[in-house]
Amino acid sequence: MKPIKILFASFCYWLALSTQVWAMAARPNMDPNAPPPPAWMSWFPVVFMVAVFYFLLIRPQMKQRKEHQVMLDSIKKGDRIVTQGGLIATVLNVSPSIVDIKINEETKAQIKRSAVAEIFRDTPKEKEADKTPVLVK
């Protein structure tokens, strides 16, 4: 929520300054009898900037947040997960806000569900690397 507030505040600040800049940028030697430009022309840069912010910042962040929530909802007992701290652990129990994990045979812990960064999946290359024999001289 905080990034949206910062984005909105910076947009308001930019809007307040841009109207003054656009007013100062008027040509001083304009014909006084010429009609003023249409009102939509003064709002076009503002609407364009809002569209750019939406499509480049807000929309991708919302999509990423939704994908992360779907991933958090799909966590089940026995999954291997990676925490935000980088720990790889096995899920023992899942509750609405807490996940019980096992880091090794002796270490068990509880973490918040939101601290799960991803579900860990071994790639085939990593499995093959584990199976390759090591020659010792």
Image (cartoon, helix red, strand yellow):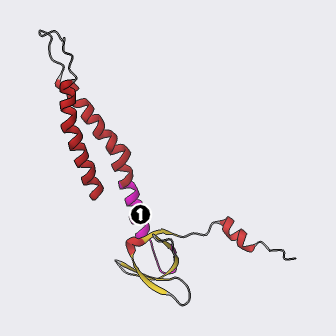
> Which contiguous range is marked in magenta?
62-81
Residue found at x 24% / y 48%: 8
The answer to which image quadrant residue 45 occupies is top left
Indicate the amino acid at tag 1: His
Local packing at callout 1 (Cα closer than 10 Å; few below 14, some 14-19, many 20+) is: some
Q: Position of residue 87 (x, y in %)?
A: 51, 75
Is there any visible trace of residue 40 in the rendered image? no
Is there any visible trace of residue 55 in the rendered image? yes
Identify whether 116 is placed above or below 23. below
Q: Name the residue under label 1.
A: 68
Q: Position of residue 62 (x, y in %)?
A: 35, 55
**In what quadrant of the picture does the N terminus appear?**
bottom left
**In what quadrant of the picture does the C terminus appear?**
bottom right
Along the horizontal axis of the image, is 83 left or right of 28?
right
Identify whether 94 is placed above or below 41. below
Let me know if residue 122 is in the magenta part.
Answer: no
Along the horizontal axis of the image, is 20 left or right of 101?
left
Nearer to us in this view, 16 or 8: 16
Nearer to us in this view, 57 or 73: 57
Q: Position of residue 102 (x, y in %)?
A: 50, 84
Residue found at x 41% / y 57%: 64
The answer to which image quadrant residue 32 occupies is top left
Residue found at x 38% / y 65%: 69
Q: Position of residue 103 (x, y in %)?
A: 52, 82
Q: Is the magenta stretch mostly helix, strand or loop?
A: helix
